Amino acid sequence: MPARAPSLATRLTLIATLGGLLFGYDTAVISGAVGAIDANFITPLHLSEIARNSLSGWAVSSALPGCVAGAAIAGWIGHRLGRTRGLMIAAALFVISAIGSALPEIGLGAIGHMGPAALKPFIAYRFLCGMAIGIASMLSPLYIAEIAPSEVRGRLVAYNQMAIVSGILLVYFVNWAIAAQGTETWVLTTGWRLMLGSEVIPAFLFLMLLLFVPDTPRWLVMKGRPDAARMVLARLVSEDEARVSFMQIEASLVVREEPLFAFGAGVIVVGILLSAFQQFVGINAVLYYAPLMFKNMGAATDSALLQTVLVGAVNMVATLIAIRTVDRWGRKPLLILGGVIMAVAMTALGISFAAGSTGIFALAAILVYIAGFAVSWGPVVWVLLAEIFPNSIKDRAMAIAVAVQWIANLFVSWSFKILDGSSALDALFHHGFAYLIYGAMSLLATIFVWRSVPETKSRRLEEIQELWRPASQA
């Protein structure tokens, strides 16, 4: 039995991390379709420059309001229907939205002949996809944490972050491979549909595998099904461990709640700013618009997508480094190191664009920036959000911080097209202005961490909680 337990926990974890993989996949799949969205849905409208860029940014980032909505209802879904069924809902939404995003005209008109009229259903399907991301972004790590034996919980939960960056790398490769099958004109008419539709494959696989996944012992106990909970625990750990775990689960369900500001406003503000700065440094503008960025550097469509694959590979390798070092070096040193790296890299990139020198130096700056984010602000912010909030306010405080993160993501993704597409700014900075802004934000984020964020490495959660007590009594 003990020999089988880690294998089962790992298998269940790998299935749950498909939610994280789809999170990453859908975050980046839109990057290959930006040009097609503009060409098919927006350019024919003959809008003013600001209106055109604003609508384009909204179309590309339209999944993000859905992410906010999905994250907001994920807790209710997970509580009422269960973690597994909640993930099944997310998987079904991924399937539906992938088909609808690739074929927004379906049921409304001839495929490829509706023109700008297809933009509204396209945005609606992207909103559904965002809801799937929002649900999965909460329930996938929650399921893993509740199903994993305590001695391997940290490692198994970390798999979800690796799944996210793996999904980003996978879709970059898929987009490049699809684009290589035809001309740039073919990509604008047909290839982009294959890119968005390709998500059906991992989404359907996720849905099918979830049919064989049990719910977590914690949820089963919470719903008055102790025998079912014991059966799941018996498959995961030894009989003695299952007995102890069952008693701990029952005890943990009696949680004392306190007012949201029982520990002062400081801990809430720190959590919100960590989430906001994670987005204001510009990471999702880079991930969403990487091919456009490389085209601005003079690359052809297929070369731009191939360089985007390189971005995904660096993202994955640096995330592996973060997973191995976060408990050795500490949270704060990694965030400061990453912030400095990003500030230097983004400033250098902005200057290289402004100077008209966008060759290998600019590519190197992008890759250094990605490495700096992935080794620090990408995974470490999630670790801190799980640690800094006292248990009695954790659910509500985390919900606020995560909602702010998605809202900031929406703002950055939408505003990039306006900044990058402004003829006035381009005349001065040659597409480099946005990157100078992100460099400044990276510097501010570094100063914020240095001045205001406590180190949580090796501290018990109760010790971290006491760090905020004086603020509530001041």
Image (cartoon, rainbow, N blue to C red):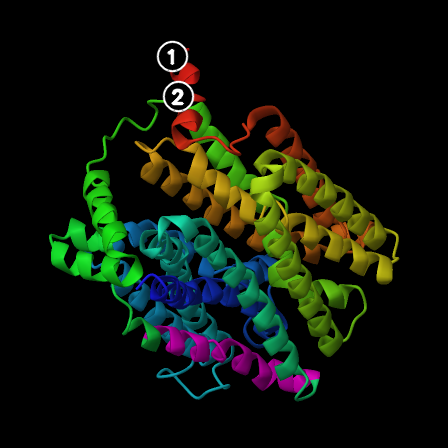
Residue 358 lies left or right of residue 387; in this view the side is: right
| Disc 2 + disc 1, Cβ < 8 Å | yes
- The spot of residue 270 in percent (x, y) is 49, 31
Q: Is residue 158 above or below residue 113?
A: above
Please indicate whether residue 244 sits to the left or right of residue 127 in the image: left
> What residue lies at 61% left-to-right and 24% top-to-bottom?
451
The answer to which quarter of the image holds residue 41 is bottom right
Name the spot of residue 378 as percent of width and height, x first.
Answer: 57, 49
Number of disc labels: 2
The answer to which of 351 and 189 lies nearer the viewer is 351
Q: Looking at the picture, how far across and down is residue 226, in whole percent? A: 13, 54
Q: Is there any visible trace of residue 49 in the rendered image?
A: no
Q: Residues within 10 Å of mark 1 (few under 14, many from 20)?
A: few
Decide whether the magenta segment is chiefly helix, strand or loop. Answer: helix
Q: Is residue 328 above or below residue 101?
A: above
What's the residue at 18%, 57% (across, down)?
Answer: 230
N-terminal of the two: label 2 or label 1? 2
User: Which residue type carries mark 2?
Assistant: Gly
Q: CA distance from mark 2 to mark 1?
A: 8 Å
Image position of 126 (left or right of 46): left
Magenta stretch?
184-207
Vertical arrangement, residue 199 with respect to residue 393, above or below:
below
Q: Residue 374, can we see it?
A: yes
- Residue 443 falls within the magenta-colored stretch: no
Q: Nearer the viewer, residue 311 or 104?
A: 311
List the residue tagged with mark 2: 264
Tag 2's secondary structure? loop
Q: x, y percentage for residue 175?
A: 61, 76
Q: Could you say which disc has been placed on residue 473 in the image?
A: 1
